[in-house]
């Protein structure tokens, strides 16, 4: 993949990703004799650091902290896949994933937990007779498209990203003051199989993944929460 990077860098620069860096990643491969390997990944970032493309020998990731609607997002991903395929002529894909991280804060006099359904809230400090309780909820679902993992985590600012995403190279419009409580909903939907690397086909699968995440989101939050967010004009 490294031999294609210079051409890809020029194309992605013209597509709005002028920032570029190369990172070395060390991974441990377990087996009869565990061994460590060092691989490269190439990162392309927009000037405002709100979206980026990460490329390795095995996968490509598009990430953004400036999410609008799915249609806009999907079109952006598709354009990147088209440009990537022009140069590398990838034969097929074996995994397609879509992940959303939603941060819920206090709003309109309601604490973060008020916005989500009781079955994913966890135990309250009052019910346990304790002062401090931090809840984490995990649900793993086999869907018609693949495998969906839903996480709900309580946290206290300023950091709000899930641990495996804390090292993101992007900036956020959102900032949480130190000491403010919040709730994170983390939806990670993955399809596995084998499909020709045709951007239109990949986009169709991604849309199906998105539809299931949408249903999961509506099953996780309260109907009253949607009404509050709509009345305040907040995009959650």
Image: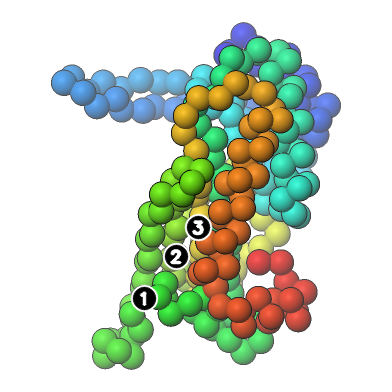
- Using a 10 Å C-alpha cutoff, classify the residue at mark 3 as few (fewer than 14 neighbours), some (14 to 19) or many (20 or more): many
Residue 79: quarter of image: top right
Can the viewer see residue 66? no
Q: In which quarter of the view is residue 51 placed?
A: top right
Quadrant the C terminus occupies: bottom right
Q: Which of marks 2 and 3 is nearer the N terminus?
A: 2
**Are the residues at dot 1 and dot 2 in contact (C-beta closer than 8 Å)?**
yes
Give the camera-side residue of 197 and 88.
197
Q: Residue at x 83, y 26 (%)?
A: 14
Secondary element type, mark 2: strand
Q: Measure the C-alpha gap from mark 2 to mark 3.
A: 6 Å
- CA distance separating discs 1 and 3: 16 Å
Query: What's the distance in space between the residues labelled 1 and 2, CA to CA?
Result: 9 Å
- Judging depth in this view, the residue of 144 and 109 nearest the camera is 144
**Circles 2 and 3: CB atoms closer than 8 Å:** yes
Residue 10 visible, this angle: yes
The residue beneath circle 2 is 152
**Furthest residue toward front:** 144
- Which one is in front, 225 or 5? 225
The answer to which of marks 1 and 3 sits earlier in the sequence is 1
Q: Which residue is drawn at 65% across and 12% down?
A: 89
User: What residue is shown with label 3?
Assistant: 186
Position of 61 compared to 230: left or right? left
Q: What element carries label 1?
A: loop
Disc number at residue 122?
Answer: 1
Q: Is mark 3 on a helix, strand or loop?
A: strand
Q: Where is residue 190 in the image (x, y as percent from the top left)?
A: 49, 42
Colour treatment of the image: rainbow
Q: In this view, does 16 lie above or below 73?
A: above
| x and y, in percent, of residue 189 in the image | 50, 47
User: Which residue shows up at 51% across the image and 65% down it?
Assistant: 184
């Amino acid at each position: 993949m490294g031999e294609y990077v210079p051409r890809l860098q020029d194309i992605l620069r013209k597509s709005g990703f002028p920032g570029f860096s190369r990172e070395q990643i060390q991974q441990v491969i377990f087996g009869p004799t565990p061994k460590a390997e060092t691989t490269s990944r190439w990162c392309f970032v927009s000037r405002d650091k709100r979206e980026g493309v990460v490329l390795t020998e095995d996968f490509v990731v598009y990430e953004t902290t400036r999410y609008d609607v799915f249609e806009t997002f999907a079109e952006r991903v598709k354009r990147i896949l088209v440009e990537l395929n022009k140069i590398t002529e990838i034969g097929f894909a074996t995994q397609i994933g879509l992940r959303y991280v939603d941060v819920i804060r206090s709003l309109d006099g309601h604490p973060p937990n008020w916005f989500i359904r009781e079955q994913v809230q966890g135990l309250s400090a009052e019910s346990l007779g304790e002062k401090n309780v931090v809840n984490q909820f995990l649900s793993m679902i086999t869907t018609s498209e693949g495998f969906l993992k839903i996480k709900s985590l309580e946290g206290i600012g300023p950091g709000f990203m899930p641990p495996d995403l804390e090292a993101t190279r992007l900036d956020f419009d959102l900032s949480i003051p130190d000491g403010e409580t919040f709730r994170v909903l983390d939806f990670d939907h993955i399809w596995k199989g084998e499909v020709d690397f045709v951007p239109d086909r990949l986009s169709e699968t991604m849309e199906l993944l998105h539809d299931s995440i949408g249903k999961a989101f509506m099953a996780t939050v309260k109907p009253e929460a949607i009404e509050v967010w709509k009345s305040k004009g907040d995009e959650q």
